[in-house]
């Protein structure tokens, strides 16, 4: 029952996040990583940050702008503020 509740919450939070990105941040590219163990981010200076997906929550969003390190802990219930803080500051 707990897993079903988490899955339900994740579905609606991800749907809201996609909607906010499409409406308010249309220039932000998105990619989805299903069944991937690692995600490699390459910054503008060619440095690399590798994220082990097994060490993250069951569901979530990572933010990356090629300048800063990727942000892997994002409050999806407050996605508008998270996006503005990461991309504008």
Image (tube, helix red, strand yellow):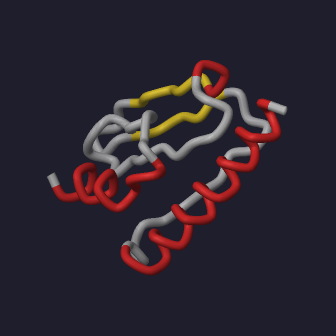
Residue 87: percent from left, percent from top: 26, 56
Nearer the observer, 11 or 22: 11
Name the residue located 38 percent from the left edge and 38 percent from the top edge.
71
Name the residue located 73 percent from the left edge and 35 percent from the top edge.
36
Residue occupying the far front of the picture: 1
Locate the N terminus and report the quarter of the image it occupies. top right
Name the residue located 67 percent from the left edge and 32 percent from the top edge.
58
**On screen, residue 59 above or below 88:** above
Q: Quadrant of residue 55?
A: top right
Residue occupying the far top of the picture: 55
Residue 34: percent from left, percent from top: 75, 44
Decide if residue 38 is on the left or right side of residue 17: right
**On screen, residue 68 above or below 24:** above
Name the residue located 27 percent from the left edge and 49 percent from the top edge.
86
Nearer the observer, 51 or 47: 51
Q: How many dots with numbers?
A: 0
Nearer the observer, 5 or 68: 5
**On screen, residue 28 above or below 4:** below
Decide if residue 10 is on the left or right side of residue 35: left
Residue 8: percent from left, percent from top: 74, 49
Decide if residue 9 is on the left or right side of residue 21: right
């Amino acid at each position: 029952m707990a897993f079903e509740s988490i899955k339900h919450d994740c579905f609606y939070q991800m749907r809201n996040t996609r909607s906010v990105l499409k409406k308010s941040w249309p220039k932000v590219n998105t990619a989805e990583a299903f069944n991937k163990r690692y995600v490699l981010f390459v910054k503008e200076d060619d440095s690399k940050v590798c994220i082990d997906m097994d060490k993250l929550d069951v569901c979530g969003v990572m933010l990356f702008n090629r300048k800063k390190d990727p942000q892997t802990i994002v409050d999806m219930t407050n996605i508008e503020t998270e996006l503005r803080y990461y991309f504008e500051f």
